[in-house]
Amino acid sequence: MAFVDKRPTLLATLAVLSTAALLLAGNGMNPFWPFMWVAPIPVLLLAAETTSWRVAAGAAALSMLLGSLTMLYYLHFVLQAPVTAWLIPFSIASLLFAAGVLLFRGLLHRGAVFSALIALPAFWTVCEYLASFAPANGTAGSLAYTQERFLPILQVASLTGPWGITFLLLLFPSAVASGLYLRGRRLLEAAPVVGSALTVLAGAVLFGAIRLAAPNSQQSIKVGLLDTDTVVFADEAPEMQELIKSYAEQAERLARHGAKIVLMPEKTGLLLDRDTKIVDPILQSVADRTGATLVIGVVHVVARDSFNEARIFTAGQPIATYDKQHMLPLFESKLTPGTSLALLSEPAVPIGVAICKDMDFIRPALDYGRAGVDLLLDPAWDFNVDRTWHGHIAIMRGVEGGYAIAHAAKDGFLTVTDDRGRILGEVRTNSGAFASLLVDVPLRHDQTVFDRHGTWFPWLAGLLLLIAAARLFTAARVASGGRSLE
């Protein structure tokens, strides 16, 4: 600690820059998942070694704020939101991260080692859970989405939702920093601290590997996905009719190649209620001729209400609809949110429909899981730069709920994943005048712990946080008369 005390500014600067750089690479629009496991270590080590809580707090807050600069670019320059849309929430997040780091530091310095180990993971998990109720974001800010390429760890979502993954992501650096701090002081304590965390992580990876090794379902359905990025949004009736004719031609082509479902993106254009008599028969005729079910997203205006709606065309059946439940602030604030689920009447397997931002939230995805769907169709619209980050959020919902996902996004990807989060097929939607994808999707509903018990893990994290906070005060009292080792 003497070197840290002599060179506090240098060490703090290095810690801030290291953690910020790792956060930028590990938690950006194209996250490189290994970096997130080590990103907090420099700041946590600094917090453990320095005698100044102000240095520890300042370094933690600044590293988190700098590490979120990719979101400044996304929110301000891509979505054209005011700078405050980034500055306010991420300043709050930075201060909260600093508070979690200080809790870790306080417990470690008082000898409450195991409480220190769980303090930051539990604190941040609770913060993420509370943030999931924000209508602008839902769970989209969770660190867990950085791990979607790490398939064994991704399976933890079937138990805990995203929050168990977040907990593990912060448990590892807390263990490493604690172990390095204790190594030169109380070596016998370092081994059980690091060992307990590694045991938990090994158990999580083993669980994921076993889950991934389960045999695939023998039943499958061929699903086609379509998109054209040449028309951003058809806001005039003639343009809308021509666009629908183009989609109908492409949908029929996929149906002739075996597609039983053809999924198209959200908000392809404006559909006034009086124009449904012209537009709907175009797609309905394809469904009637081919027997395929077609799903397309529109903005449907009915009297004074407007809906971000998925219209579902099934052979010989009335047109069904699903209305998006979670609206994108600013862009969709004038649209009326839906409240109901939608299940396809054909084919004769449980298949549901949600739309884009719905997948940032636990519901309605959890409700579809509890309804036993084998596949969830997700017409969407991404913003090119976020095609990987935001476009893949839906993958988490499928792992949580035990079902496959078909995601068709304008300005993004056509993506199909199975109930384990494995990508079965993916193409960029700007790959041609019409991008298409045809995939045999395994049909299986694997009822998960998360299906049955929902958001139980954040409550457990809250309990662990209360225990750690209480230990901070009891350890301090014990430390005043002697060293507390838990």
Image (cartoon, rainbow, N blue to C red):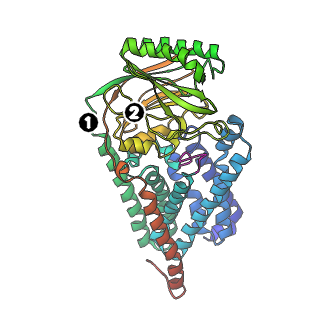
- Does 392 sit left or right of 205 as displayed? right
Q: Position of residue 244 (x, y in %)?
A: 54, 16
Q: In the rendered view, would you say 458 is above or below 187?
A: above
Residue 450 seen anywhere in this rendered image of the structure: yes
Residue 238: image quadrant is top right
Q: Position of residue 297 (x, y in %)?
A: 53, 26
- Does 81 sit left or right of 127 as displayed? right
First in sequence: mark 2 or mark 1?
Answer: 1
Q: Secondary structure at mark 2?
A: loop
Residue placed under numbered mark 1 in the picture: 215
Looking at the picture, which amino acid does disc 1 mark? Pro
Residue located 66% across and 52% down the image: 89
Q: Quadrant of the C terminus?
A: bottom left
Q: Which mark is residue 343?
A: 2
Tag nearer the camera, 2 or 1: 2
Density class for disc 2 (Cα within 10 Å; few <14, some 14-19, many ≥20) is many
Residue located 50% across and 81% down the image: 474
| Residue 128 lies in the magenta-colored region | no
Q: How far apart are labels 2 and 1 at the CA level?
A: 26 Å
Q: Position of residue 427 (x, y in %)?
A: 49, 24
Looking at the picture, which amino acid does disc 2 mark? Leu
Residue located 68% across and 68% down the image: 54
Residue 399 seen anywhere in this rendered image of the structure: no
| Residue 135 lies in the magenta-colored region | yes
Residue located 53% across and 16% down the image: 277
Q: In the rendered view, would you say 188 is above or below 216?
A: below
Count how many numbered circles sit on residues in the image. 2
Q: Which residues are magenta?
A: 134-142
Q: In the rendered view, would you say 105 is above or below 474?
A: above
